[in-house]
């Protein structure tokens, strides 16, 4: 229990630090959103309206600590400010519109990659020294391939040349966005190629990491003792080898899940997929600092929560952690 409380306190401090930096950095940077908005609108803003716009972006002459408490109050109410590139749409509305697309695509593919990769890694480790080792060069190559390069190749082959999948987009724009089978099937059809891209480009890393860790664990004395006792091979592999070898992968999986919220930006940009990564790309293009600020905060908090969940899972997987707790 003490172990868990220490971790919660640590991540609470890290979350507070991320929130505070998210507040300070835009205020320490030169310029402000109002100036950018005036330049974007070529000065077609009445001077009387500029004060109201500045207030809407949280730009006031109040002391910094007063602005900080106002910022925290707005944050707890879900108010992340207004976007510049999509003015006057709230940042929270834009983020919540992009988040489901990223969670649906990158989240599911990350889980699929982890499950396939760790399972295959255990099998390859158990069959080390056999014909299965011939798969290692291919896995190493796939692990080295960048997401965007894989995406471009698959688009060229399956979309441009074969016409099997659409080139870009998340659904057929001619279909109403309603919970109907027509819309859902369109989303699945458009998301198939991006999903295949992410799975192919990421599962090889899980395979190699899990295989290497399992091979290391299989050489430990407690595994040799389990085999000498005559325990079934499946029990030795799963309960002794894989359970201990998967611990580093759990940490990596937690980080990957935290990064899911950030999306796979280059992949989303190539497929014009309206997720968080593509939204962040648009924010950078439009110099939309409030939107970038909101996205960075959401991504940071997601990584923190994912790490906390990984530490909680460790308590159940690692007896040494339970003894410490």
Image (cartoon, rainbow, N blue to C red):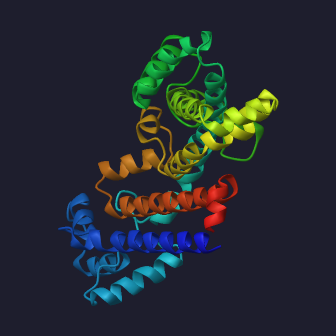
Q: Is residue 200 left or right of residue 243?
A: left
Q: Tell me: residue 233, above or below residue 264.
A: above
Q: Quadrant of the N terminus?
A: bottom right
Q: How many marks?
A: 0
Report which quarter residue 46 is drawn in: bottom left
Report which quarter residue 111 is drawn in: top right
Q: Position of residue 140 (x, y in %)?
A: 46, 22
Q: Position of residue 206 (x, y in %)?
A: 55, 33
Residue, far left: 30
- The residue depicted at 65 percent of the width and 19 percent of the height is 127
* Res. 94 visible in picture: no
Q: Position of residue 172 (x, y in %)?
A: 60, 34
Return the residue nearer the eye: 104 or 223: 223
Q: Is residue 35 left or right of residue 282?
A: left
Q: Position of residue 131 (x, y in %)?
A: 61, 9
Return the residue nearer the eye: 203 or 28: 203
- The residue depicted at 41 percent of the width and 66 percent of the height is 88
Return the residue nearer the eye: 144 or 82: 144
Report which quarter residue 221 is drawn in: top right
- The residue depicted at 68 percent of the width and 32 percent of the height is 224
Q: Quadrant of the C terminus?
A: bottom right
Return the residue nearer the eye: 178 or 13: 13
* Res. 294 visible in picture: yes
């Amino acid at each position: 229990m003490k172990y868990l409380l220490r971790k919660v306190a640590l991540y609470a401090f890290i979350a507070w630090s991320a929130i505070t930096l998210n507040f300070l950095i835009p205020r320490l940077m030169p310029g402000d959103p109002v100036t950018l908005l005036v330049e974007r609108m070529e000065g077609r803003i009445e001077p009387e309206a500029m004060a109201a716009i500045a207030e809407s972006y949280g730009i006031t002459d109040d002391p910094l600590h007063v602005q900080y408490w106002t910022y925290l109050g707005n944050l707890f109410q879900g108010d992340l400010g207004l976007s510049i590139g999509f003015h006057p749409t709230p940042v929270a509305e834009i983020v919540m519109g992009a988040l489901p697309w990223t969670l649906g695509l990158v989240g599911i593919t990350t889980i699929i990659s982890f499950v396939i990769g760790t399972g295959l890694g255990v099998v390859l480790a158990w069959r080390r020294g056999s014909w299965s080792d011939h798969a290692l060069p291919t896995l190493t190559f796939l692990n080295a391939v960048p997401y965007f390069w894989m995406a471009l190749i698959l688009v060229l082959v399956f979309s441009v040349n074969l016409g099997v999948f659409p080139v870009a987009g998340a659904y057929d724009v001619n279909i109403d966005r309603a919970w109907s089978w027509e819309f859902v099937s369109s989303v699945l059809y458009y998301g198939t190629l991006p999903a295949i891209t992410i799975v192919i480009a990421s599962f090889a890393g899980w395979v190699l990491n899990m295989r290497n860790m399992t091979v290391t664990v299989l050489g430990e004395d407690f595994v040799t003792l389990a085999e000498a006792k005559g325990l079934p091979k499946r029990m030795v592999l799963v309960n002794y080898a894989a359970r201990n070898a998967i611990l580093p992968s759990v940490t990596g999986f937690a980080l990957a899940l935290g990064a899911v919220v950030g999306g796979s930006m280059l992949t989303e940009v190539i497929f014009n997929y309206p997720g968080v990564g593509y939204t962040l790309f648009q924010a950078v293009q439009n110099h939309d600092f409030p939107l970038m600020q909101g996205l960075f905060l959401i991504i940071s908090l997601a990584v923190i929560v994912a790490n906390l969940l990984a530490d909680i899972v460790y308590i159940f997987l690692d007896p040494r952690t339970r003894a410490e707790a």
